[in-house]
Amino acid sequence: DIQMTQYPSSLSASVGDRVTITCRSSQNIGKFLNWYQQKPGKAPNFLVFAASVLHTGVPQRFSGSGSGTEFTLTISGLQPEDFATYFCQQTHNVPHTFGQGTKVEVK
Amino acid sequence: QVHLHQWGAGLLKPSETLSLSCNVSDGSFSGYYWTWLRQSSGRGLEWIGEIYHGRRASYNPSVESRVTISQDKSKRRFFLEMRSVTAADTAIYYCARGGEYYNSGTYYKPLDYWGQGTPVTVSS
């Protein structure tokens, strides 16, 4: 299985901050990398596919980058509704595996 | 707007069979990867498997021997059966749709719609 390692596991930030989350894969996955946001008690919400393409309706303050084994999700200008947990997922190989998640908390 | 609604028994005893259903309303049923996942504090988010119309289902090797994913296109539903459950199968189970998104010559398969989740507890 491809191992997905996310870091940090949690971070504290304030509204307006720029936040960067990193996801590393154990082998080259090209751009087969998705990002999701999850709020407590809810299913994950799809944000980004192909490492950097925003899903329809996702605010432009979100951006994704990377290819191969190193990927980042950046939130530029954190908004109150962005406090949540973020997960990366690779769909290069079955089983499709997820990172452990990064919880973005209020500072 | 596509909506996935899932249901099934939430409390099982060890060795029993977990059965979940997921109904898809609106949108096409064909052309998508209908997927089951689970989430627990111990294992995080785990992809269980997926089924695509006209193809064999694909499974996570960690559960493949105990799992069957099937679909009924006429009812716009797909199903998860997990046999011989243990306490380690305690989790929130989700159904989801794997879409086909095209970018720069390649199709990608993110999970774009999710069910509401079904908490499942396995306990004697």
Image (spheres, rainbow, N blue to C red):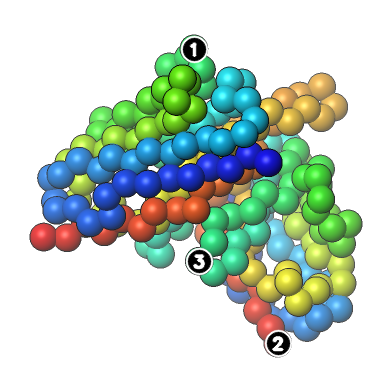
| B37 relative position to B16: left or right | right
Whole-percent x and y of residue B88? Answer: 26, 55
C-alpha span from label 1 to label 2: 50 Å
Residue ID for mark 1: B54
Q: Chain of mark 3?
A: A
On screen, residue B35 above or below A77: above
| Same chain letter for marks 3 and 1 | no
Q: Amino acid at mark 1?
A: Gly
Whole-percent x and y of residue B30? Answer: 58, 20
Whole-percent x and y of residue B108? Answer: 69, 31
Viewer-nearest residue: B119 or A19 = B119
Element marked by disc 2: loop
At x 60%, y 61%, the residue is A38
Whether pointer 1 and pointer 2 mark residues with C-beta atoms closer than 8 Å, the reply is: no
Q: Amino acid at mark 3?
A: Gly
Element marked by disc 1: loop
Q: Chain of mark 2?
A: A
Neighbor class of circle 2 (other Cα within 10 Å; few <14, some 14-19, many 20+) is few
Q: Quadrant of the N terminus of chain B?
A: top right
Viewer-nearest residue: A1 or B59 = B59
Q: Nearer the viewer, mark 2 or mark 3?
A: 3
C-alpha span from label 2 to label 3: 22 Å
Residue ID for mark 2: A107
Element marked by disc 3: loop
